[in-house]
Amino acid sequence: MKRIYILLVILLGSASSAFAWSDRAAAAIAEIASKHLSEEARNNITAVISTPLLENANFLVKERKEKREMMSSEWHYVEVYNTLYPMLDNDANAITQIENAVTALRNRASLPEAEVRRNILILVNLVSDIHCISNIRIEGFDRTYSGFNFSIWNNRTGKRSRYSKGNWKKLWENSYSSRRSVFSPQDYAGEVMHCFREDLAGFANGTPTDWTMEVAGEAKSLLSEIFAEGVVIRMEEFNRLEMFHERNMARAGSRIAMLLNDIFATK
């Protein structure tokens, strides 16, 4: 049972609502990235983006609504072989689109300012998304696994709460994000950075493929154990899951900053 507790911790640490995190968490991730930008990167980004990154945390979703096209709807996800290797047969995946954005930004001198802005925000959005387990689709597992069944036992009331398939959004936003309802994104980011202050530098390494496979490995470990069965966890265990949710927020924010700092460094 202890192993299952740990695996649940991993999943809940990365599960999400539509396309990734709740709006509050997505904005906090962007704020974490902002706090770790070099002065050079910050100045370059500010020159083309007039609003803070946290106000653009759902840029792609807003762009689709404005342009009424769904071309980028698959960009938030990555298909992964059961052997934990990414399926990159076409461009409609987060890894390829992050790499495309990085390439475009390295050659930004030839781009109009609007395209530089767009590629910065694509990078911010999609690096955040690949740190969410529900955006990683693993071969051999139900694509709706982010809503599998499990129960939580409330020690205070002595009652068991049932969360069924399809209810991850409700669980995630009501049980975790609502705890931050009085927090601004800046406050939320500050709390996460404080909790992981000793780990942030270590998170800032690797590539988008490395990060995606890290999340996929966590997901596969969990799903191999409990996908087909209900699991009961005690409320104190459930409360501990929030730490792992915030760990993936810290990972995402520090890695966004790492890419932008490298792109905008003086060569």
Image (tube, helix red, strand yellow):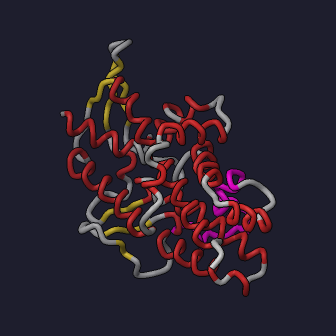
Question: Image check: 22 left or right of 200?
Answer: right
Q: Residue furthest front?
A: 267
Q: Quadrant of residue 78?
A: bottom left
- Expressed as whole percent of the image width and height from the top left, the position of residue 179 reads 55, 29
Query: Which residue occupies the foreground of this view, 194 or 237?
Result: 194
Specify the principal SS of the magenta part. Answer: helix
Q: What is the total number of numbered labels drawn onto the structure image?
A: 0
Quarter of the figure with the C terminus:
bottom right
- Expressed as whole percent of the image width and height from the top left, the position of residue 177 reads 55, 35
- Expressed as whole percent of the image width and height from the top left, the position of residue 48 reads 78, 68
Query: Which residue occupies the foreground of this view, 96 or 107?
Result: 107
Query: Which residue occupies the foreground of this view, 216 or 207?
Result: 207
- Expressed as whole percent of the image width and height from the top left, the position of residue 154 reads 36, 19
Q: Quadrant of residue 183?
A: top right
Question: Image check: 246 left or right of 234?
Answer: right
The magenta-colored residue range is 53-74
In the image, residue 65 lies in the stretch drawn in magenta: yes
Quarter of the figure with the N terminus:
top left
**Residue at 53% over, 71% down:** 98
Q: Residue furthest left?
A: 1
Question: Image check: 11 left or right of 121?
Answer: left
**Residue at 51% over, 59% down:** 255
**Residue at 55% over, 53% down:** 253
